Each structure stands twice: as structure tokens, then as C-alpha cells.
Amino acid sequence: MTDDLELRAQIDELLLLQRAAQRIASVLDIDVLLEEVVGDVVQTFGYSRSGVLLKDELTNELVIAAVRGWTMNYHQKGERFRIGEYGMVGHVGATAETYYSPDVQLDPYYQVSELLTRFELDIPLKRHGVLIGVFNVQSTSVDGFAPSRIRVFEALAGHRAIAIENSWLFLRERLEKERMRTELRVAELMQGQLLPQHDIRHAAFSIHGVCLPCRTVAGDWYDYIPLQDGRIAVIVADVAGKGMAAALLMSSTRGILRLLAEQVSEPAPLLERLNKTLLQDFPRSRFVTMAYVLLDPRDMTARIAVAGHPPPVLIAETPRMLETGGLPLGLMNAVYVEEQIALTPGARLVLYSDGVHEAESPDGQQFGYSGIERHFTNPSASADSLLSEISRFAGGLSLGDDATVVTIDVQTANAWCNDHVRESGPGETSQLPTIPPG
């Protein structure tokens, strides 16, 4: 009969061990996990006091991470014990071996944690042979642990050590993701500041741009640069790739181009100078496509040079794509050519990135150059309405690439007169208004 009772008790202990292990294995939040661990001892096994202490590698101390059942509050959560110096837990921290005291009042290592304590069990929590903490159990009876129960608790401690390590890994991964999200939000804000904050509304031209990143940050970029002689440079560029790496290279390209624009304003020579600089600075696997337009309000012309970028579309009496082209920037030495076009009142020049014409519908059809031309036959069309149509065309799916559109609208004759002509005295001529900063 006694053997049957002992066998039954062992079976019950194993079942308790299995249930406890299943519960703690399903918890990834470290704080919740540790509360589960100390609660299991009290609720499942019937012992009155339990705690988990984790090792602080920097200070070589054990820190109470969770505690349950201390009525006199001798030791609180967060309290520290020097390994090898304080109490039984300090001894176990130093030896990394289980220590059981059947009567703490006779034990040389014991330090009072509560007056009612009579036995104490401390089990090291180890992973890959390295101590990560100590599991502590106390109760009010003398010699309350049979050897078989100690073995059960040691097995349970092994499960808990694994669960704690998994929780740490989960916590580190969560913190890393939060850090990356924070950095992406900051990068998104910073990149937004690099784009023009205002449209240009000139007596001769109205310029508006919009960028729709396919991720948090984009490799696309557009800019307006008012020059000292009254001309305006308009740029749309696309760095090969997506995400943070492309955004960083975009920022670098922007800075270099803005410096060069103060020295070389003509499109083709500027692209050649920029290409030589990027050949020295860019990673070999990266390149930039760019459309550079130089608007001259004095003779109402646009000089255009393109480096591997989708051709601008001129919307006038008959929509047409401009044929100017050249190699992308940063690949090899190249020569670029310009095309000069006359800008008639009411005409519109559309610059865009390949994320626009390469946008795909759910059945794999591309929006295409014809879709851009067709969209802008509507006089009320805009850069924003084009991106809205592309989103609808994609069927609500995420775009596969960044999409950027810049429109340059030439003022109509009436608008030109309203903006440009002022009352003049004898011999006076009207002047172009000052170009606002981009």
C-alpha cells in the first residue's frame, strides 16, 4: 500500500510538472512569466513562499525579479544580493549547485527572509551551463522536501530557465523592432524635410510635386532649385533599390547636386559632373536615374537632360514623350545631351519615376506611359490625382516601387498678364517677381 501511495504521489508530481511546464512555455512576456513561475509554487505545489532571482552580469549580483508569499516584507522585488556573500541564494549563485536546508535555523548560510521559514530550497537556473538566476522555495515546516520532490523542482527549474531565456530573446527582439520603428519614423520625418515644403507659384510657371513611398522611406526624390539668374531647376531622381539604404544614398545625391547647381546650372554638364562624383562615392551596385529640367522664364523654354530616367511627358496640343536620354548616374563615365523645348501658355510638363508607369494591376497589367498621357488629357488632372488613379489601378495593393510625380504648368496668357503686368510709368518695364524658395 505504501509503495502504491508513493507511486501515485510521483505520478501526481509528474503531471503537475507537465502542466506547469506547459503554462510557462506559453508565456513570452518576461514579467508575466516570472509571476507565473512564483505563483505556480504557491498554487500548484502548496508551498507558501517562492521567488526568482536573476543574475546581473555587470554587478555580479542576484536581483529579486519576482516574489510571492512574503508576509513580513523582509525582501522586496528589486532587492540585490551579492553572489557568494549573502545567504543561501548567494551561495548557490557562487556554486551553481542546488542547495537544500531542511532546517534553516541550523544552516550556516541562512539569512532571515521571514521569521516563520523553516526549510529552504535554492536551485540554480542555468542555460548552456551558465548561471542566469536562482529559483527559491521556502515553507514553514521542517524538512518539507523529499528527494523525489527536489528532483521534480530541478526539472521544473530547467523548463523555467528555457522559458526565461526565450522571454529575454523575445524582449530583445521587441525592443529592437521598437528601436527600428522609431528610427524609421525619424528618418521619414527627416526625409520629408529634404523635399520641397512649398510649391513654386511663379508668374510664368506653377510647379507641384508629390512622392508616395512604397515603404516608410523612399529612394525617390524631387527638388526645385531657384537660381541666381532667375531660372529654376526642377529635378526628379530615383536611387536604385528601396528602403533605408536607398534613402541614405538619395540624401547624399541631393546634397551633391545642390552644391553643383551653384556652379554648373546647364543640365548636361551638371549631370556629367554629378556622374563623376557619384562614380567615386557610390557603392558599385547602386546607381541613380534623374531627369533635370532648367526652366527659363525669360524666353519661356525648358532645357532637359535625362540620365536613365523615364522620359518626361509634354502635355500640349498633342501629348508626347521627350526622347532625351542617357546612362544612369554612378555606373560609368558618360556624356549627356540636352533637348530644348518651347513652353507655350497652358502647356504642362510631367516628370515622374518608374514607380508610376510600372505600377501593376492585380492581373499584372502595367499602367504604362499611355496611362500617364491619358490621365493628363483631363485639364483638372494633377500629380495627386495621378497617384490616386495609380492606387486604384493597383487594386488597393501596395505599390512595388516608390512613385513620384512633378508637374510644371505653364501659365495661360490671361494668368501671365494678371501676375506679370503692373502699372508702369513712362520708360519703365515690368520685372519678373522674385522666385520664392523651394
Image: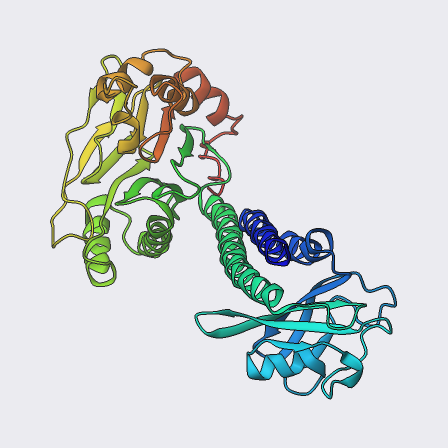
Residue at the location (34% across, 34% down)?
A: 298
**As drawn, which residue projects farthest toward the front?**
1
**x then y, percent, for residue 387:** 39, 24
The figure's colour scheme reads: rainbow
Q: Quadrant of residue 53?
A: bottom right
Image position of 334 (left or right of 434): left
Q: How many marks?
A: 0
Judge whether residue 23 can be spotted in this image.
yes
Is residue 261 depicted above or below 437 in this figure? below
Q: Nearer the viewer, residue 120 or 221?
A: 120
Q: Is residue 59 visible?
A: no
Where does the image place residue 390, in percent across and percent down from the top left? 35, 21
Left or right of residue 394, residue 131 in this image: right
Residue 107 image position (x, y, % from top left): 74, 85
Q: 72 left or right of 103?
A: right
Question: Looking at the image, which is closer to me, 337 or 174?
Answer: 174
Vertical relation: 335 (above or below) 361: below
Quadrant where the N terminus is found in the figure? bottom right
Residue 299: percent from the left, percent from the top? 30, 31
Q: Residue at x 34, y 52 (%)?
A: 245
